């Protein structure tokens, strides 16, 4: 592993553990190369936070963070408006993935969002299309895959899922063929739904595995895993999760992914300036 990748992991560990980095260590980093690597992994906003604490955030990182904050606010506001329409039409819906995960990060805007994903009642596909078109969206794809894609300039991008997985991932498709069995009512909403923490983790892991098996995932997937476990790990039912992973055939993947995430980002007492994580987390690969 080269130095710039070690620098990225160190700063991300600082970010998600809300720890200030060593200023001298940061001063020695190649900020240009760091920015390019962060952009490739969609973690510029997360890395901005420890750079800011070290007084080393340059203009590109500042702009990336401010844009991430602004986009998250716009997407949140628009999602509320869209789901209010769903409520009026009696359409059940379930916000997915980053919509939930971003709230677990230490600071708003730290998790960059390219879009919002929402699972909804497929019986209302035409009604949802009408709602989105009336709100000024262009229907980029409808009825041709597991998700319908709607876009509106400058930054609105919504993926509306009629199912969670496509037929080409048979085990995952079969497991999630009836998502209704997993849905719980979202407090304060008549048609809004949520997953239990355990089922949310299982779904996110299955989704990541789909990408991993088709070509790989970036470091943000590991970061999401760590952030989730930091927030929920002490209260979730690991036995239930293990059973679901076995049923999905991804138990080994989940165990290795979780171990790697904890190894990279766990930091008892905060990451040390030398880049090590301490005995409990092991050494950098």
Image: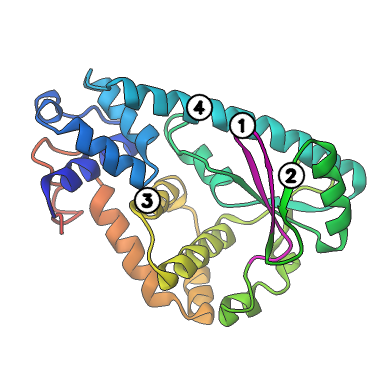
Front label number (3 vs 4): 4
Q: According to the image, label 4 marks what residue?
A: 69
- Check the image and report above or below for 111 versus 51: below
Mark 2 to mark 3: distance in Å?
36 Å
Mark 3 to mark 1: distance in Å?
31 Å
Q: According to the image, label 1 marks what residue?
A: 154
The residue lying at 62 percent from left, 52 percent from top is 96
Where is residue 264? Give x, y as percent: 24, 52
Q: Secondary structure at mark 3?
A: helix
Q: Are marks 2 and 3 in contact (CB under 8 Å)?
A: no
Where is residue 196? Give x, y as percent: 62, 56
Mark 1 to mark 4: distance in Å?
15 Å
Q: Nearer the viewer, residue 226 or 71?
A: 71
**Which of the marked residues, 3 or 1, is nearer the chain's N terminus?**
1
The stretch drawn in magenta includes residue 183:
no
Where is residue 134? Give x, y as percent: 85, 38
Q: How many marks on residues?
A: 4
The residue stretch that appears in magenta? 148-164
**Which of the marked residues, 2 or 4, is nearer the chain's N terminus?**
4
Q: Place residue 209 in its image quadrant.
A: bottom left
The residue lying at 47 percent from left, 73 percent from top is 242
- Check the image and report above or below for 36 versus 176: above
> In the rendered view, does 240 fall on the left or right side of 49?
right
Mark 4 Cα shell of 10 Å, populated few (<14), some (14-19), many (≥20): some
Mark 1 to mark 2: distance in Å?
12 Å
- Check the image and report above or below for 63 versus 248: above
Q: According to the image, label 3 marks what residue?
A: 226
Q: Nearer the viewer, residue 160 or 257?
A: 160
Q: According to the image, label 2 marks what residue?
A: 138
The residue lying at 65 percent from left, 80 percent from top is 174
């Amino acid at each position: 592993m080269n130095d710039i990748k070690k620098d990225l992991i160190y700063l991300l560990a600082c970010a998600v553990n809300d720890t200030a980095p060593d200023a001298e260590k940061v001063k020695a980093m190649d900020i240009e190369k760091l920015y390019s690597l962060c952009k490739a992994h969609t973690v510029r906003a997360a890395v901005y936070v420890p750079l800011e604490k070290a007084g080393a955030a340059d203009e590109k990182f500042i702009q990336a963070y401010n844009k991430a904050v602004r986009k998250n606010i716009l997407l949140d506001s628009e999602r509320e408006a869209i789901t209010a329409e769903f409520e009026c039409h009696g359409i059940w819906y379930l916000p997915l993935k980053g919509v939930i995960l971003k709230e677990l990060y230490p600071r708003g805007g730290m998790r960059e969002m390219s879009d919002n994903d929402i699972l909804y009642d497929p019986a209302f596909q035409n009604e949802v299309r009408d709602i989105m078109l009336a709100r000024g969206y262009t229907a980029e794809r409808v009825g041709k895959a597991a998700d319908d894609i709607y876009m509106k300039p400058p930054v609105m991008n919504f993926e509306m899922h009629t199912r969670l997985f496509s037929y080409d991932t048979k085990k995952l498709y079969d497991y999630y063929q009836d998502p209704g069995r997993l849905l719980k009512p979202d407090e304060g909403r008549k048609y809004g739904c949520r997953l239990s923490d355990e089922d949310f983790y299982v779904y996110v892991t299955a989704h990541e595995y789909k990408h991993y098996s088709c070509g790989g995932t970036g470091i943000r997937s590991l970061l999401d895993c760590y952030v989730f476990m930091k927030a929920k790990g002490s209260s979730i039912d690991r036995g239930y999760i293990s059973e679901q992973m076995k049923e999905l055939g991804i138990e080994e993947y989940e165990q290795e992914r979780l171990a790697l995430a904890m190894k990279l980002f766990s930091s008892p007492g905060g990451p040390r300036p030398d880049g090590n994580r301490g005995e409990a987390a092991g050494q950098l690969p």
